Amino acid sequence: MRNSSGRTSPYTIGQPPAPIIAGSGGPDQSGGPAGTRREVVSWEAGRDAAGAGCCREGTPVVTRPRVYITRRIPQEALHIVARHCDFEVWDRDEPVDPAVLAEKIREVDGLLTLLTDAVTEDLLARARRLRVIAQMAVGYDNIDVEAATRRGIVVTNTPGVLTESTADLAFALLLAAAGQLPQAERNLREGPWTTWGPMEFTGQDVHGAVLGIIGLGRIGAAVARRAAGFGMQVIYYSRSRKLDLEAALGCRYVDLPTLLGEADFVSIHCPLTPETHHLIGEPELRRMKPTAVLINTARGAIVDEAALVRALREGWIWAAGLDVYHREPLPADHPLLGLERVVALPHIGSASIRTRTRMACLAAENLVAVLTGQRPPTPVNWTDPAP
């Protein structure tokens, strides 16, 4: 496609952004030998994506904010950024190299980050002009928000848009772990399918069971609504009572020990804070029913994984469905992956096309808002200027 400058853009609507290849007609800013593959989309590519920011030779160029995007994101979000900013995109499937991010942060006004990017105080100390970190996630425990705030850097996240897809995933994990569905599917694929056995692949009933929700925020409430459709009784524990949700959802507030003792399924939806780190450890797991199933789609460090492994091996609880872990990516030899009654997913709670696109677009809108002097839609540490 051609942009308003008449030059061919490396972007095609609806397609992933194409990297600039040195020696292939695109500018080489890699600093490497001629003909080597760049790992990021160039600043020029960022301008061309919007068909703007270019001018005739001899015409003064208005400096636009520079943005570094730490992973390939949907085209719709790139166009939001490109209307106002020049940008680079890390062009590999794995997370951006920390050494690369340490260099890029020196020269940009904005970052668009993921949970896999460690934005530490040491990294922020290298930033010369950074004004905003737009996180494409609800959680932001990978970012030192206090250090950013001290430096006047706005941090934003993407709440709300992933509520329903994450609740879907949590309930899918609940059903899969309760019914031993992955084990049955694996048996069928690996064969041989011998015959029907009276107690083969039997699991725990969901209908009429008690669901205990830890953290009745947006996602926790969405899970409670799904539970109602299965005729489940819902109890919850949260930092504060949610009287409006109790009335709307028919759920009951209890303290944590009561929840753990009564629930057939325990689903975690609270944020990771110093207070919730290892909230579920050996004492809590021992308090649960031996037929109980633990679901965690929040943050891995809320659960003491060593205690969870022991609980499953020794039969303190029946099964677990997990989408998050203390260390991500989870090593292939982690003990959890060797346990039969663990359904383990690679942190895909928001992984629908629509949701991920909405998350990327909201992150882009947050980023652009700050860089154009506006209040971002979903700030983490925004302070309104004095009148």
Image (cartoon, helix red, strand yellow):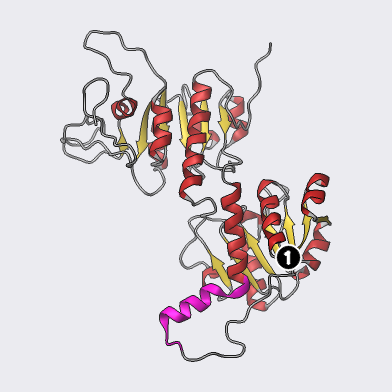
Element type where label 1 sits in the image: loop
- Front residue (pair 330, 378): 378
Quadrant position of the C terminus in the picture: top right
- The disc labelled 1 sits on which kind of residue? Gly
190 relative to 252, above or below? below
- In the rendered image, residue 188 lying in the magenta stretch gets the answer yes
The answer to which image quadrant residue 144 occupies is: top right
Q: Looking at this view, is 151 or 9 the one in front?
A: 9
Q: Residue at x 32, y 27 (%)?
A: 43
Give the magenta range: 178-193
Q: Report the residue at 34% width, 26% height from top.
A: 50
**Residue 53 visible:** yes
Horizontal and vertical percent position of residue 42: 30, 31
The 10 Å Cα crowd at callout 1, few under 14, some 14 to 19, many 20 or more, is few
Q: Is residue 82 above or below residue 207?
A: above
Q: Is residue 30 left or right of residue 194?
A: left
* 277 magenta-colored: no
Q: Judge whether residue 339 can be spotted in this image.
A: no
Q: Quadrant of the N terminus?
A: top left
